[in-house]
Amino acid sequence: MTLYHRRTGDHTDRQLHGLVRDGSLARVRRGTYTDGKLWRSASDADRYRLAVHAAMTCRAQAVASHDSAAALLGLPVLAPRRDRVHVTVDGRGGGKTTAATVEHRVPLSDVDVTVVDGVRVTTPARTALDLACVRPAVHGLCAVESSLRLGAEDLPGVLRRMGRRHGIQLARRAVERASPLTESLGESFSRALMLGWPEIPEPRLQHEFRDEHGLFVARTDFDWDGRLVGEFDGAVKYEGGGLTVVQEKLREDALRALGVHVVRWTWQDLLHPERLRAILTKALARAGLPAEFRPASGLPAEFRPASGLPAEFLPASGLPADPSRVR
């Protein structure tokens, strides 16, 4: 979508207001407009990205950061906040907040800045760590793992350049606990929740199972001792329709033929963590795997989730359909 700016002088204020009233234009931010028809058909995520572009046109010294950077980078995060545009300015002093913009005034090195579609934004690594400083630990861990999937490097170096600031210890914890092996936001969310349950052993990630002839059977999201496999059912696995569902069923049958128990869960279970906890506890018992109570010192308190999570924990694309109902 193209942005039109009032300051260009192509239209008077009265003309602009008239174009907005008749639907020809839509107001993105104060003084910035776009095609009304395209705006009405755009998703919330696309509207937010356009709002970020609009905000950055008049912020030469600022860099899009936090949720705004995540939106432009395509960095999946839990509960993305789109009510205001987040920018960072190199310096100290805390920044300021308005109805439309949150300014973070903290140290920012040029090496932690990149450009997306002509807009200066924080890199995936810096974006994830900024979010980890200001969000609950589960959010931060998911953001850091998302950045790893986008190729983020030298997270410890980014942490050092961030210096001492509020929430930096949470960001350090997220880096320490992050794994480069999770392959989706749902897998990261699942793993983050498991870290908070002392009776659930920490799973192995992305293990390849082979049959007695050494032939490949499956690569699984999670497994415990090769006896129990855990699979997060996100929408992507089932985008191929009925054929893909059949293939997934055959894959699961092949795992069971190896004597492996298989358990699945969906976004709905992640949004109600007590359900996932019960699913895993029962599955571990069926597989003959005893509960493992890890010492409290190995469980950062901030990783212990509440008994329920609100709907805003949904990813940006919304709640995927439950593929288990297709079968």
Image (spheres, grey):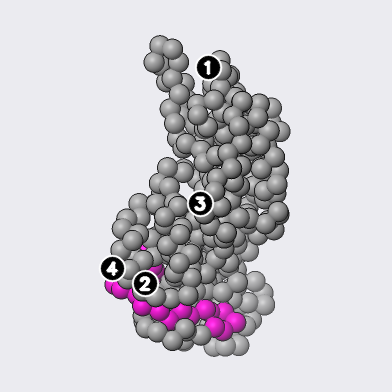
Dot placed on the residue nearer the N-terminal end, 2 or 4: 4
For the residue marked with disc 1, what is the amino acid? Answer: Leu
SS category of the residue bearing label 4: helix
Q: CA distance from mark 1 to mark 2?
A: 49 Å
SS category of the residue bearing label 1: loop
Quarter holding the C terminus is top right
Where residue 111 is drawn, which disc sits there? 4
On the image, numbered disc 3 is attached to which residue?
298
Q: CA distance from mark 3 to mark 4?
A: 34 Å
Q: Residues within 10 Å of mark 4 (few under 14, many from 20)?
A: few
Magenta segment boundaries in residue numbering: 97-123
Q: Is residue 101 left or right of residue 56?
A: right
Q: Residue at x 50, y 26 (%)?
A: 226
Q: Position of residue 253 (x, y in %)?
A: 58, 19
On the image, numbered disc 2 is attached to which residue?
162
Dot placed on the residue nearer the N-terminal end, 1 or 4: 4
Q: Nearer the viewer, mark 3 or mark 4?
A: 3
Dot placed on the residue nearer the N-terminal end, 3 or 4: 4
SS category of the residue bearing label 3: helix
Residue 293 visible at all: yes
Q: Residues within 10 Å of mark 2 (few under 14, many from 20)?
A: some
| Residues at marks 3 and 2 touching, judged by CB atoms closer than 8 Å | no
For the residue marked with disc 4, what is the amino acid? Answer: Val
Residue situated in front as seen by the camera: 83 or 217: 217
Please say if 141 is above or below 184: below
Please say if 8 is above or below 293: below
| Residues at marks 3 and 1 touching, judged by CB atoms closer than 8 Å | no
Q: CA distance from mark 2 to mark 4?
A: 12 Å
Dot placed on the residue nearer the N-terminal end, 3 or 2: 2
